[in-house]
Amino acid sequence: MTHEIATDELALPKNVRLACRDGRQTGTTRGLAMGYVQCNLVILREAYAYEFLLFCQRNQRACPVLEVMDRGNPEPTRLAPGADLRTDLPRYALYRQGRRQADVRDITDLWRDDFVAFLIGSGITFDQALEDAGVPTTTDRWVLRTALPTEPAGRFRGPMAVTMRWLSPEHAITATQVTARFPFNHGAPLHIGDPAVIRADLKNPYFGPPVDKVPPSVVPVFWACGVTPQEAAIAAGIDVMITHSPGHGFVTDRLARDLATP
Amino acid sequence: MTHEIATDELALPKNVRLACRDGRQTGTTRGLAMGYVQCNLVILREAYAYEFLLFCQRNQRACPVLEVMDRGNPEPTRLAPGADLRTDLPRYALYRQGRRQADVRDITDLWRDDFVAFLIGSGITFDQALEDAGVPTTTDRWVLRTALPTEPAGRFRGPMAVTMRWLSPEHAITATQVTARFPFNHGAPLHIGDPAVIRADLKNPYFGPPVDKVPPSVVPVFWACGVTPQEAAIAAGIDVMITHSPGHGFVTDRLARDLATP
């Protein structure tokens, strides 16, 4: 039985997950369940789990691990008891040998009992706090490759991905202060101003339209992005990996404000 | 050639480590290299590294991992390039099957090429910041077992260890604010007041003299302690583990203030 989803229904994490599970929600999770922690998802085989966890530990700002599931377990008992990572995202990306093969709605058939799932904090998590402080979050946002190196761990290595938001000077200052209160979810920006300094690839964004030039009134602000570990795993060319599809995250039951330092 | 170590010599991390390396420094590292990050050390075999790293990730407050060495590598290239974890602590504790067998000065002969070394932030790290804020740090400090559970990971489990400091009310408030600025090194206290609430074992401290009762003028303040992962590893009874001897930490080249949120 399908029915129209009322917008206020999708204010609650459990409803978002159920709507994903039964196929009513297939689009982006941005703007849904505002004020709750959202996560990026990376699933890979147990054989790579240590190196990947180590990569995240060495690059905490880009890869803030919020929960690691036990081998073969699709339930995030700490962040959303009763949820199922195989069904509760709107869209997944399947990679084989480092190449994106397909996007799928459900990964139940692909699940292996030697899979280890990682939930990594997403920048979407602090959108409510930004909005509460008057900083707009719905437009002018990108995910970009840069030349900033990550600390390698085993086969995982490669450049850092960043989120870029175009803000007014006033909002850039506010956004810095607000996000600095989330050290366990990317924290404060890592760069502000000229994208060329970090060699952010404006022409080929991971997410968002290509950019020719930054308007003079805009202050570009950059945060370490949770797409980074995914990109490292792709570069490692490991046999199989499943991630959330960009912008289609996992909505947890945790309040974002509980992740912030008081 | 041995010679007396001038106190100001031991204000610098490299000098502390060299004094440990050549046997001139065998005592506690508390009060040495004030203002620099000090670490607890846990070394175990590669076979346990993933579960142990996962235990630390699940118990971040007690087990703030600052660096993990690659397999067989005794050099902490990120925290103290050129240092050697086999020689540069004043005293080590050797455990076999979970039992403390011996304390030794040097672990070069014990080193294995499948060892993985973990450096975990110590509460000593914020002593300078506390002193700067007028909070005394040289007396009235303990490490205690509690009944607070940790999040288990594989074979690693068990109760949390805490640091207890006895402070005046004014200093307790200041200490809370100061340490809250170190989310990546234990952070703010996890309890304040009655030890019985967390079933802190005052009669059998891991470090410090047994306590009968807390004087009425004192406010006991408790932080998650970096001895926790060590205790979990002991409880796991793994075949061999080497740690720092309590109070005899590893002094890094990093400034403590760089670990604090600005």
Image (tube, coloured by chain):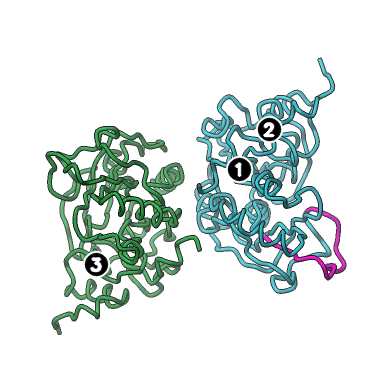
Chain colours: A green, B cyan
Queried whether the magenta region covers residue B208, the answer comes back as: yes
**Chain ID of residue with mark 2:** B
What's the residue type where badge 3 is placed?
Gly
How many marks the image carries: the answer is 3
Compared to residue A99, the image places residue B208 above or below, namely below
Query: How crowded is the residue under tag 2: few (<14 C-alpha within 10 Å), some, or many (20+)?
Result: few
Q: CA distance from mark 3 to mark 1?
A: 45 Å
Residue A146 on image: x %, y %: 27, 37
- Looking at the rendering, in which quadrant would you find the N terminus of chain B? top right
Asked if the residue under mark 1 is in contact with the one under mark 3, i.e. CB atoms within 8 Å, the reply is no
Q: Which residues are magenta?
A: B207-222
Q: Which mark is residue B110?
A: 2
Residue A101 placement (x, y as % from top left): 16, 50
Q: Which mark is residue B79?
A: none
Q: Residues within 10 Å of mark 1 (few under 14, many from 20)?
A: many
**Relative to A229, A92 lies left or right:** left
Q: For residue A27: magenta?
A: no
Residue holding disc 3? A31
Left or right, B34 with respect to A133, comes to right
Q: Residue at x 42, y 38 (%)?
A: A153
User: Between B1 and B239, which is closer to the camera in this rendering?
Assistant: B1
The residue that label 1 is drawn on is B44
Is circle 1 on the same chain as circle 2?
yes
Please indicate whether residue B211 sits to the left or right of residue A30 in the image.
right
- The amino acid on which the numbered mark 1 sits, given as a three-letter code, is Leu
